[in-house]
Amino acid sequence: MPAKSATEPFITPELRATAFYFSIYMAGAAFNVYGGIWFADKGLSSEQIGIINAVPVLVTLLLNIVVGRVADKASDWRQVIVLGCGLGALIPIGLFYVHDFWGILIIWTLALLPINVIGPVVDAATMRMTRRRGTQYGSIRAWGTVGYMVTLFAVGWVISQFGGGIFLPMFVGLSILRGLVAFGLPRFRAGEGELKPPVTGATHLGAVMKPFFLLPLVGFSMVYATHIVLNAFQALLWMEQGLSADLIAPLLALAAFAEAAIMFLFGRIARRFSARSLILLSAATAVFRWICMGFQPGLEFLIPLQLLHAFTFALGFMGCVNFIANWTSDEIAAEAQGFFQMLQQTMSVIALIAFGWLTGLMGAQAYFVAAAFAFIGAVLIWLSITMQGPKRPAEARLG
């Protein structure tokens, strides 16, 4: 066994991964606060802004599985993550030098692409490391949401104090910060002298592409898509209901708080329930949540409905990540997780096309359509459970 560093008891691999997760969504939070306004200030039309946001998603769809396969074949997943974060730190600097639609589109796509494609690699690598070391993935992943919430409030305050001109330097600075923190990531696979875990689960993606495996992932991807679509219009719908801006921001933050809380607690929950049971509960709760939202409830009901985000998103996402890890080996960990992200993005594109015009046509009643979409997802998850039971009693166990 190699000698341990004197700092090992304090700066553990889990702590280093936590620091990275805390930074990974900060630049995205900054964009969510002011990015659309920055695009508009550049003279871009709403149609052009929509294209700029859609292109990185479409390109990511084509590359997710490929990047995951490359990461799985590397000596450690860390190499691909650090490379992606390095590119994601340098390329956004180009935004200072472009001012037209095509220039912004190219630089923006190139800036987001490395971060988008390493997301599944980070999740897969961290899940495998924590399982090997007997620690909890959820409590590490939760800090990503915490970092996102902190940045939402911080960026909003800074822009209110210094004006919109500070947005781009902040966005680029947070992207560079993420890249620097990535260099502190630990080795995720077992190192020399460490006991390597036995190979369990499928060693190539085709071996696990069966209905019982695909249906829960497709089903939750449908649930995930309802969040993406309606979150894009949620603030607008609430304003039409008469809610003021100073109430909308805390309501959005409340959902993020609930998401982080369930991730911190997920290890305890997962000991009692199978992964697919949790995914099904997530979908069923989403159906209930969207139906309630369709009736345009008042603030006293919106608060508990926003807290249900812990179940409709966080519980289902964590269940899916764990479900994938149960049925696949380290050899295809990132590739399988990349496949899951591809499903989520595909469903999001379908939902955006199908639901986008419904929101303008139906207003808050578009939530009823979202409920129907989530219900179909719940049926698919339930069908998987009827096809094949848990792989083992501890199917939902996190490590």
Image (tube, helix red, strand yellow):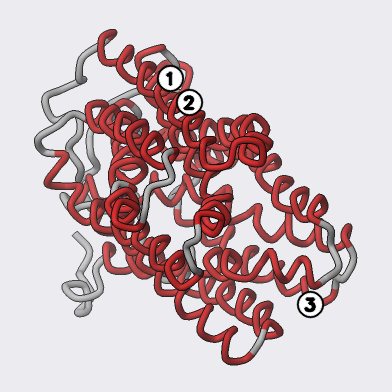
Residue 364's tag is: none
The residue tagged 3 is 96
- Is residue 127 at least partly visible in the picture? no
The number of numbered discs placed on residues in the rendered structure image is 3
Where residue 158 sits in the image (x, y, percent)? 54, 86
Three-letter amino acid code at disc 3?
A: Phe
Is 287 positioned to the left or the right of 58 in the image?
Answer: left
The residue tagged 2 is 373
Where residue 118 sits in the image (x, y, percent)? 53, 51
Quadrant into which the N terminus falls: bottom left
Along the viewing direction, whichever of 328 and 157 lies nearer the viewer: 157
State yes or no: discs 1 and 2 in contact (Cβ < 8 Å). Answer: yes
Three-letter amino acid code at disc 2?
A: Phe
State yes or no: discs 2 and 3 in contact (Cβ < 8 Å). Answer: no
Say which residue appears at 40% left-offset and 37% top-offset.
290
Along the viewing direction, whichever of 132 and 215 lies nearer the viewer: 215
Where residue 317 sits in the image (x, y, percent)? 36, 41
Three-letter amino acid code at disc 1?
A: Ile
Say which residue appears at 52% left-offset and 42% top-offset.
364
Disc 3 crowd rating (10 Å Cα; few below 14, some 14-19, many 20+) is few
Alpha-carbon distance for marks 3 and 1?
A: 45 Å
Is 188 positioned to the left or the right of 35 in the image?
Answer: left
Mark 3 secondary-structure assignment? helix
The residue tagged 1 is 376
Say which residue appears at 45% left-offset and 67% top-offset.
249
Is 383 positioned to the left or the right of 26 in the image?
Answer: left
Where residue 235 sits in the image (x, y, percent)? 53, 57
- Is residue 40 at least partly visible in the picture? yes
